[in-house]
Image: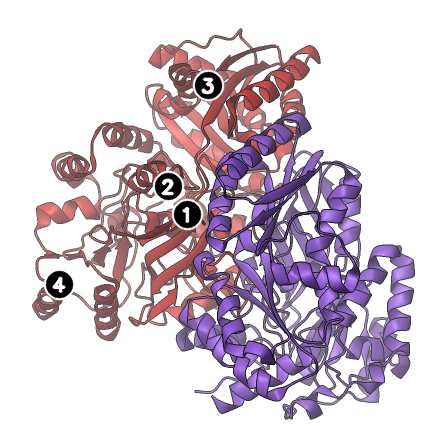
Chain colours: A purple, B red
Amino acid sequence: MQCRRALCKRWLHLSGRKSMASSAHLHISSMLSKPQLRKRQFHWTTGYRSRDVEFTHVRYNVQRLGFAAVTTEDIAFFNGLLPGSVVTDPDILEASNVDWLRTMRGRSQLLLRPRTTEEVSQILRYCNSRNLAVNPQGGNTGLVGGSVPVFDEIIISTVQMDNIINFNSTTGVLTCEAGCILENLNNYLEEQDFIMPLDLGSKGSCHIGGNVSTNAGGLRLLRYGSLRGTVLGLEVVLADGAILNCLSSLRKDNTGYDLKQLFIGAEGTLGIITAVSILCPRKSPAVNVALLGCDSFEKILDIFKESKSMLGEILSAFEFLDYSCREVVCEHLKLRNPLQETPFYILIETSGSNDDHDQEKLSHFLEKVMTSGLVADGTVATEENKIKALWALRERITEALVHDGFVYKYDISLPLERFHEIVIDMRNRLGVRAKRVVGYGHLGDGNLHLNIVSPAFDQQLLDSIEPYLYEWIAQHCGSISAEHGLGFKKKNCIYFSKSRAAVHMMQQMKAILDPKGILNPYKTLPAFTQ
Amino acid sequence: MQCRRALCKRWLHLSGRKSMASSAHLHISSMLSKPQLRKRQFHWTTGYRSRDVEFTHVRYNVQRLGFAAVTTEDIAFFNGLLPGSVVTDPDILEASNVDWLRTMRGRSQLLLRPRTTEEVSQILRYCNSRNLAVNPQGGNTGLVGGSVPVFDEIIISTVQMDNIINFNSTTGVLTCEAGCILENLNNYLEEQDFIMPLDLGSKGSCHIGGNVSTNAGGLRLLRYGSLRGTVLGLEVVLADGAILNCLSSLRKDNTGYDLKQLFIGAEGTLGIITAVSILCPRKSPAVNVALLGCDSFEKILDIFKESKSMLGEILSAFEFLDYSCREVVCEHLKLRNPLQETPFYILIETSGSNDDHDQEKLSHFLEKVMTSGLVADGTVATEENKIKALWALRERITEALVHDGFVYKYDISLPLERFHEIVIDMRNRLGVRAKRVVGYGHLGDGNLHLNIVSPAFDQQLLDSIEPYLYEWIAQHCGSISAEHGLGFKKKNCIYFSKSRAAVHMMQQMKAILDPKGILNPYKTLPAFTQ
């Protein structure tokens, strides 16, 4: 128990740095085309401070497991197998050894970039026979240290597996290789009036294989549901090199256990996803956004219920931010919030097939919530630039907080009635020791981003936050990781959200599918101790 | 291979009888309240021909596995554990030994009706230690023999576990015990302006635990997606009696592998589901139905694309029937099809939050598909009785076929472009030997019901259908069971839809979770042979 707590504390200390890297990266991604982006990423990761990051095994005092070390014979084998796709140049490797947040650093000396599933299969067959550990890597945009090696694991990147295999515009089913970048897929689909069922801040870099491996949530989950429902098929290479072909594009198939579900959210610890089949919705021609100010959190829940009733099938986002979020974006980013000052704000987005209908529904809804006193003030945007301006008040909170001080960041799920209680509780608990305690997030999904700011890192403040916060979440049946996964950093916190019996069963699955433990070791699950 | 084919043939012969039983039962269910229904079911199953059904182990020549036999000491133990809930009366047991279709009959001498999860746990702990096999049973409405014993397995019924634990009208999350009848849940939700995300013909009898165990599809899948996305949590009792609590009501939780997915669709072979948490959508106040006649199947696919574009978020059903279906319901049930004679018909349903908007969208859509020549004739219903009359033309096909002769029934998934090809192929192949070959189903989900009629059972005709049909499905990457599962009858056909590697992995999962194989033996997976 002591060990677990220590690790959690450590993680939070580090996670405070993540916003800067993350927002910088996103900023770059949004401006550059794919070739530019790759070049820039390379430059960024090799040229800027990566070597200053402490080695993960040193920082976290991790013991290396008994895997074999890569030999010159191994490298010769891979050069024969993947001519031109074997990287041993330390400068290039640095980019893949360090995570986005620059909080983790492995010391892998070998990066492989296979082009086909068969190559991935041969790599794993060889590694399994040689007892060489591997680290699957997509866009390396993970936030919990799942995508970079801890020691000298061989990095297997999906970067060269970026072909679209098929898109059926009748069914909306897209089949593609795991290394396709999410934004590229979405752009491809938009040309045919479809969209991907998920959208993330890191869409300019993240790979669809990584999205599926981490069961990514994001902005469209409220409307289109989770990847557990929209992913129809997967192709996976198992630890021993066997190719498991579950790449169905059928919506219904009840023949035996649904094996692909095991690999969704397993963070590459059970197999390497090499191809994905996914159900894509039509693009909505009509989009409207409303920003509303409210006096109490109870009223927000009433508005949420009303929106589900009156906006029903066109509701596509229900985002929450409290007054402290308004303050921080106004203060540091000079954004203007057009509404009067209220304790809470919500941003509602509708997407539908008929703009007149949607505006009429939205108008009736707004009339009702304003005349009934649920909303104190509100504004609606129907033009693209105004929609963007309203979204900025929600989307740029993370960036603004970076300018505010040292940020302790948490991404949690809670029952809706408890959603904001923890923010108030934390404010009362920390008092003036915290410069700011803010709450925002995907209220429609029960996903709260709780961020606490102090002028500089403060161990005593952290001790007041944890493990108190995790225990509070566990007590109220929440999740300590809503969408980021466990990776390296949170694997020992799993017991705050899952029972020992459940974790034991997960460990059994791991033992069956990867008996030597070569796939992404040191991640997702605590060490198997019985 | 010989063995597998023989089993498949056998099953089809039997499945021809299913419609009568099924439709009779549904008719009863729809008229009676829950207490009446239970009484009637009891009467039906004990009083009518159940004893005429041949024992499964005789009919299919199954060898009993080496489980212990129930002793008087065992019965004494269960009487102590579950006073008043232990059934040994042969007349009552008969109802649980025979399936809905009266095609399978076990010879269990012990039926247990636990009231709590703890009781289920104690039952399984005892059975596992004694090596006694068990047969979990919900509403006993399965169509592939998964819900009744093959030999003397102890039947564990969820019938007394029918409490609603919680419903949150803000989030729409319902949590209930596994024995709740689907229709009762839906009625409960409708009072609060919500609905269940699934709807089935057997809703008057089937249990939600059984629905989840068989990953039931049904009429609402097109709109609300599969149970893999809507089921948020499960409570499961494992073979050794351990209670696995994954009864989360959170929409997002990425802490480790998603274990509950293993039990969705596992047909009770990995654990017994005792409670379910499920995300329920709002009830749509506006419903409209259109019936359209078309000249070609290609035009139907164009209409489907157009409907997804123009009806988008309000499209809730896209059902298909061919001309032979029109003939059979008109001939045997005297239903009137208001449209002119065309080779194909489609039934489109919209559900939304604003009737004016929905009617306008539907009207624009119909104008487009009619003026562009995609539709030859069409009619729209907005009143409830007219909507029901149009739905009857689709929903009563199964019933009409029963009056037509011996029916060979198949429930398959196919890529949409192949959806009707197999119907034509089968007509050409069988020629005049088949009285009728009809195709209908959930086109929006790629789920085809292929039914072939002959005046009486004809082994030669069956030999012309199988294994040809299954091979055709496999060749075109379809599924031999879209939504009914594998159960006892189709377990050996799994290789037509899944690879040997995949089935092997499923068998490994089974071996971990139920090492003695006591949970629903002889079902879902072929015997583990290595």
When asked about the image quadrant of residue A488, the answer is: bottom right
User: In this rendering, would B369 be left or right of A515?
Assistant: right
Instruction: Have a look at marks 4 and 3 and say if they share a chain.
Output: yes
Pinpoint residue A95: horizontal percent, then vertical percent.
83, 76
When asked about the image quadrant of residue B444, the answer is: top right
Q: Chain letter of disc 3?
A: B
Q: Which mark is residue B11?
A: 2
State the CA–CA distance, disc 4 to disc 3. 50 Å
In the picture of the structure, the residue carrying the numbered disc 1 is B490
Q: Secondary structure at mark 1?
A: loop
Q: Mark 3 is on which residue type?
A: Cys
Q: Earlier in the sequence, mark 1 or mark 2?
A: 2
State the CA–CA distance, disc 1 to disc 2. 8 Å
State the CA–CA distance, disc 3 to disc 1. 26 Å
Q: Chain letter of disc 1?
A: B
Tell whether label 4 touches label 2 (CB within 8 Å).
no
Instruction: Have a look at marks 1 and 2 and say if they share a chain.
Output: yes
Depicted B385 relative to depicted A490: above or below: above
In the picture of the structure, the residue carrying the numbered disc 4 is B82
